[in-house]
Amino acid sequence: MALRINVPPLTRVLLVLLLGLSIVYQAAWFRQNRVYNADRRHAIAWIALIPITSIYHPWTYATSTFAEKNVLTLLVAGATFFYGGKYLERAWGSAEFGKFLLVVVLISNFVATCLYILVFAVVRTRTQAWISLQGSIAIQAAFLVAFKQLVPEHTVTILKGLVKVRVKHFPAIFLMANTLSGFVFHTDTAAVLSWLGFLTSWTYLRFFKRQFDISSTNTGGNTLRGDASETFAFAYFWPDMIHGPVSAISDGMFSLLVAARICTPFSTAEIESSNEQANARGEGGLPNLMNQESRRGGGGKREEAERRRSLALKALDQRLQAAATNRQQPAPTVTIPSNASATDAKPDLAEDSRDDSAMV
């Protein structure tokens, strides 16, 4: 039987864009160096994001993400889009997955451009203005944040069990690795884009993305705004020893944003529903993306629908059991002392006897 790899439509588009634009970028760079023997920045200004020329090529805010500089980064990006894109598109749907990508790519690239233009205005170094911002590093950071939200307790085993890392630790490891690389190897663009991708994706998933409330008993399809669960708070992305300081700083910044009416605080009901949803996702686990059954006729979509249905039924069953327990509690009873009733009856008997004698 022929091997079939079922890839969702938007993930397919991402892979085609990645391969096509990377080839075009390399061809343009080769032609510029071979024919004109000139600086490569003029050849790639229309496909890679260059801060000083971005105003004339606004489409590069999107295309630069898919233009990789070498084969190694191309392979890493391809694996990221193939495995991460497949899972997230099936978990959220193509529409929500597309919104997530647009928010991460456009905001990260725009903020990075503003930062490098600001540095150029301060230090007046042409290198900062003509630097090339490209690659999928922001999307890689965003995918790790999404996995931290969906399957934080899943353990990834590397080198046949020699290295075991939980998914919730990957974002911090990724950021630290890119930050150190920026200082040591002067890959500051990767460090900047990784941090911006991390912050943009976390902000969107935490405060803005709509998701179905599987803990609700309403069949009308309630949705939650963002993810108010405690395990997805900003402090939980970092080691336990620094949770306190990070939480104090992030809470202070959030209070300022609320005072400025940029963010809206979560209600108690939203926090409880998000915590239930996080617990249900943690028990659901991470499906095998290379499962043979998921490759046949859209099996992945059916598996995801079944997983959601089972989690919703489990949450509904827990609520029904809690309600039944509350109804089965015995009602309080009131007892009347026997001596009090006997005392009260005596005057009545005496009064009846006097009435009978009067009648006689």
Image (cartoon, helix red, strand yellow):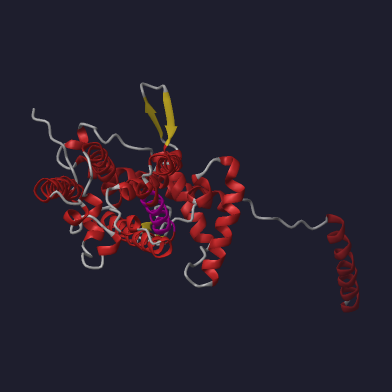
Q: Identify which residue is drawn at 17% across, 51% down.
A: 38
Closest to the observer, 301 or 111: 111
Q: Is residue 331 above or below residue 308?
A: below
Q: Position of residue 142 (x, y in %)?
A: 36, 49
User: Does residue 298 appear left or right of residue 264 in this picture?
Assistant: left
In reply to whether residue 244 is colored magenta, the answer given is no
Quarter of the C terminus within the rendering: bottom right
Closest to the observer, 124 or 73: 124
Q: Position of residue 231 (x, y in %)?
A: 50, 47
Toward which corner of the image does residue 346 lie, by quadrant?
A: bottom right
Q: Position of residue 187 (x, y in %)?
A: 36, 45
Q: Identify which residue is drawn at 51% across, 67% down.
A: 257
In reply to whether residue 198 is colored magenta, the answer given is yes
Q: Visible in this render: residue 263?
A: yes
Quarter of the N terminus within the rendering: top left
User: Does residue 19 appear left or right of residue 247 in this picture?
Assistant: left
Q: Visible in this render: residue 320?
A: no
Closest to the observer, 247 or 284: 247
Closest to the observer, 341 or 278: 278
Toward which corner of the image does residue 341 lie, by quadrant?
A: bottom right
Q: Residue furthest bottom?
A: 359
User: Does residue 81 appear left or right of residue 214 in this picture?
Assistant: left
Q: Identify which residue is drawn at 46% across, 45% down.
A: 279
Mark count: 0
Magenta-drawn stretch, dominant element (helix, strand or loop): helix
Q: Is residue 83 above or below residue 339?
A: above
Q: Identify which residue is drawn at 39% across, 57% down.
A: 200
Q: Position of residue 181 (x, y in %)?
A: 40, 40
From which residue to which does the magenta span run?
A: 193-206
